[in-house]
Amino acid sequence: MSAPATSFSAVVAAAPLSIALVGNPNCGKTALFNRLTGSRQKVANYAGVTVERKEGRFLAPSGRLVRVLDLPGAYSLNATSADEAITRDVCLGLHAVEARPDLMVCVADATNLRLHLRFVLELIRIGRPMVLALNMSDAAARRGILIDRDKLSRALGIPIVSTVAVQRNGVRDLIAQLDRAPPPPPTGQHDANLHAEVRRLLADCVTMPRHTAVIDDTLDRVVLHPVWGLAILALLMFVMFQAVFTGARPFMDGISNGMQLFGTWLGATLPDGPLRSLVQDGIVAGAGTVITFLPQILLLFLFILVLEESGYLPRAAFLLDRLMVGAGLTGRSFIPLLSSFACAIPGIMATRTIQDRRDRLATILVAPLMTCSARLPVYTLLIAAFIADRKVWGLFSLQGLVLFALYAAGIVSALAVSFAIKLWRHRRGHEVEEHALLLELPSYRIPHVFDVAIGLWERSWIFLRRVGTVILSLTVVLWFLSSFPAAPAGFTGPAIDYSLAGRIGHAMQYVFAPIGFNWQICVALIPGLAAREVAVSSLATVYALSANTEQAATQLQPLIAAQWPLATALSLLAWYVFAPQCLSTLAVIRRETNSVKTMAIAAGYLFALAYLASLVTYQIAHALA
Amino acid sequence: MHQLTDLPRNTNATISEVVAHGDLDPIAVRLAELGFVPGEPVRVVAKGPVGGDPVLVQIGYTRFALRRSEAARVMVCAETA
């Protein structure tokens, strides 16, 4: 390092630098952010993955601390949606909490400069220190796009670096640039017409052999075909749910057997008494039962991650837009609703990309109806216990079909509810304004095996942590409530009937008997509010404690198969399609809509639907049986 | 000159005008920001399965899905190939 550079870095080492990553949607800001800071924020191939500002930091080679802010993508400072407004506010120094960054790192997709340069020019006009990162420069080179960086840099008046966020050393030049003294704010004469300037810059500095990637044209011809496109979409969804049920079976059985061996071993090792009951009936039977569902949840996420990375999701939104408009939603609702299959919380946050306020509200209200991954354990348990394991037409598994039907029930009721909202608005005479779509379809991309693997690993970690914290602690609490007060001598019947949980369960039966829930289910519903999977662990604990025989402790599924009438099982399935059994979802609805009333409406209508659906299901099934 | 919605698929055309509905038309403003400005070459790549709605438009290096009502604001001249 030369002498002046050393003295410069010695001066700045003390002063941290704050930078913000700004740019069009889907240009790779978050991938760049992850590469710079070593974070693992979610990245995918569609516009609007990042809907909130994210902060991270790293140490530059000079020892200078760089604070990095990742902002939601925006097409313009003239924001049209909630996520774009965050970016606008930070860039213009209007944000309530976030101070204006020292340096804006404007990120542009090198393969899409015609669109992205316009926003670059808009940002330059703010007149703050700025660096341009031409991201995906490897993809641009592959497509034969030549960019004269020096010339473009002189014309724009800001430094330019090339980056490849998905490669290990793809941000070396950017870090070196950040480690230098911040560039002066851009000055000079600018054309009033941004588009004219973009055109001139492109003509002067960029050579482009072809406008589109050949592969995109070819794939879109099939995938967006009015008939084939819809057929492919339906097939994809169907295969997904079949695979989630049948593909994960062997792994789940393996874990289940392991848990059973573990429980038996514990039973033989620990002395008889409350401790053995706590470990065996509480922890192993409760939390252990939930762990068996990990393979299934991972398989579901494998599908979701691959779909997100490939760029297919916005295409599905394109195909379904008209249908969703008819039902009072918008094509833009598709991605938030699909994310809700994983969990309604990120799904509801993703609605920030919906520009129209009413469309956004309708999407938020129906997002909890999408079958989230926490419901899978409940569905799987009941399906495996009550639905025969046989093939239909020699091809599909009946159990997989029932699971598909439950997912479909969620989707259909979401469409019905949004349609009802639309009708209600119409009758109230609300002005039918135009809703905008304006959805960008990205280039296709082959998902990186490594990224998908990381995504799955993170999911496993989140799930296991949930089992280890929320689910485990609730199971232990429930064990206590179900074990104490202990039954006095001479009490006939299982001791749990005398316990607090037993009494609560019996009291709740007055409300839930008409829909066929026994007192054990009633008990499990309460802790299930914290996390839906807890309903399974709670049932396991309650049944383990009610059981008189030792060997019943770790096997919930055959137990309920023997004890519950089919009508009860179907009724509980119907309940879970609708019930707002998740406090975190309700909290996020309140935060995103800033309205307790909306949250109450959501909770109220979901409970009402759940009770009604279960009542109808139970009474019909009971009458037929 | 006709509306973008009437343009047959895979026909090259040039934008002649983007018609705003009223003085403050956020959709027209956004269309301009996305590059729908006079002189730009466009092409309809695909149409939605129901009633040809939405339309998928190639503009520059990007593809945007526009509803028919949005696309109808864009007036184009088809290229005489």
Image: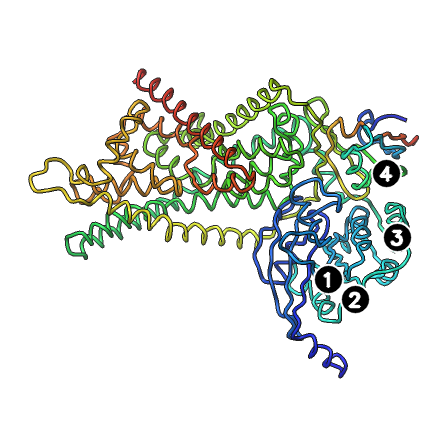
Residue tagged 4: B37
Q: Position of residue A572 (x, y in %)?
A: 35, 30
Task: Tell me the amino acid under the disc marked 2.
Answer: Pro
Q: Earlier in the sequence, mark 3 or mark 1?
A: 1
Chain for numbered disc 3: A
**Front label number (4 vs 1):** 1
Quarter occupied by residue A618:
top left
Q: Quote the CA–CA distance across marks 3 and 2.
A: 21 Å
Query: Dot 2, crowdedness within 10 Å: few (<14), some or many (≥20)?
Result: some
Q: Quote the CA–CA distance across marks 1 and 2.
A: 9 Å
Task: Tell me the amino acid under the disc marked 4.
Answer: Val
**In the visual, does A79 lie left or right of A538?**
right
Residue tagged 3: A201
Q: Quote the CA–CA distance across marks 4 and 1.
A: 31 Å
**Front label number (3 vs 1):** 1
Residue tagged 1: A103
Mark 1 and mark 2 in contact? Answer it, CB < 8 Å.
yes
